Amino acid sequence: MQLWTRPLDRPIQNLIILGVAWKLLLLLIALLSPGPGYDTSASLISSSEAEGRVLPPAIQYILGKLIRWDGIYYVQIAGRGYVFEQEWAFGWGFTRLVSLCAAVLEKAGIPHCDGLEALIAIVIAHAAHLFSVLVLFSLTLAVFAQRSAWLAFTAASLHIISPAGLFLSAPCAESSCALLSFVGCYLFTKSLGGNGPVTASHDILVLLSGISFGIATTFRSNGILNGLLLLEEAFRTLWNLKTSFQISSIRRLVATGLGGVSVATGFLLPQYIAYSEYCGQSDVNTRLWCKRALPSIYTFVQDHYWNCGLFRYWTISNLPLFLLATPMFAILVASGLWALKVTPDELEQTHTNAKDVRQSTQGPVLQVIRNLAVSQLILVMLTSTTAHVQIITRISSAFPVWLWYTAISCREGKTLLFGRIVKFMVVYSIVQGGLFASFLPPA
């Protein structure tokens, strides 16, 4: 009963309990979902390449319910590498992590068996979602001051019931991208030094945040939007240099620049690997994208194989998918606009100690909230005009502003708004869970 009556007494423990309970509910829905749906592609993963070694039937059944949609590609790529051109649309970082874990297990004497990569990927997805909840709790405390435990607990709880649903449990990269994005945001917030002087240790934190954002980008390309935090910090440091030349500012600029390079590397490294494979050999037919001024396999694959491009998804047949995505778009836009104009005085209403709020949400830390809001609004613009719009419910899981907005709306007495958002999240996740496990849209 303590979970419901005094959740803040042990917030970490209670978040873990809530997370496990929600995962079990979604897993139960998936297991009870009827049939394989209209696509049985997941069965192709179970081959006979592992000398007849197979996982127990119960594990195979569970894996079969979770290897759906993007998960099929991730698992196959992790097992045998990138073979087909269109596979480069799926996060290089996540597939390499799964492959590395499988190799480590084999080195440790655990024999390879069919479905091992899928099992590893699912374990990683579950662990990443849980840790992203805990990191979001710490990030919220860092942004909104230590006395905002209630807000941090509420935002983290909302992330548990994210409308991304089973995509945060399946062998997909969304939960890992969210974890790495939140870690990067936390490190960046800590690097600002609060109201004290910025030291060399703070500069190391900003570099580490860039590395975290870069790794997140190798998992999902939308992770690159986190780099706007570093870009703004670089411009802010340059402005300070204009008015006051200091060694500490030079050091800060170098650390921020290296962090930005790390983010760019996260996007460019997979592109370089693909370019070397497809375009680096003169004795084979060169692909068309190799001859472009910017030879990016990612943009080519999204255009050629997945039909992503400006307004291409804006068709009558896709209208139902736009309607499904509308609630999430509305939440992201409303929360983004709220964060852009929010002031420390308005945020005082969400805390018990106004002095702490003024100290924590003025200046650089308020910069974090507004910058993340800009990234969130850019995500909305790009997804609504160039991508398959229904993915917004899962890729939004790596952006914290809308979770803060929802949590604060409850504290400010907007219980009707809060209730509607929570109902949408719960209902969407449950319905999507059943459809997902049956290989039915939306994906």
Image (cartoon, rainbow, N blue to C red):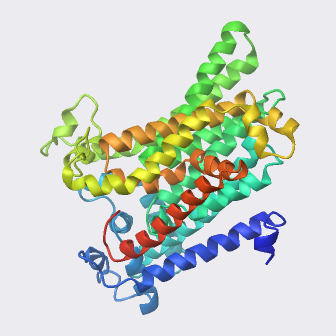
* Residue in the image at 75% along x and 29% along y: 362
Depth order, front residue of 395/150:
150
Circle count: 0
User: Left or right of 286: which side holds 324?
Assistant: right
Percent coordinates x, y for residue 172 in the rendering:
43, 63
Can you say which quadrant of the picture contains the N terminus?
Answer: bottom right
Compare residues 3 and 397 and report the one nearer the observer: 3
Residue ID at (58%, 63%):
129
Work out whether 161 lies above or below 109. above
Please identify the residue farthest to the top as the structure is shown: 243
Q: Is residue 430 visible?
A: yes
Query: Which of 356/99 is in front?
Result: 356
Image quadrant where one finds the C terminus = bottom left
Q: Is residue 77 visible?
A: no
Q: Position of residue 170 (x, y in %)?
A: 45, 69
In the rendered image, residue 120, in percent from the top left (x then y), is placed at 49, 72
Identify the image quadrant of residue 45: bottom left
How far across and how far down the image is residue 89, in percent? 32, 52
Placement of 314 over or under 101, stated as above or below: above
Rendered view: 82 above or below 249: below
Compared across the picture, whether 307 is left or right of 419 comes to left
The structure residue drawn at horizontal position 64% and vertical position 13%, both measured from the top left corner, is 239
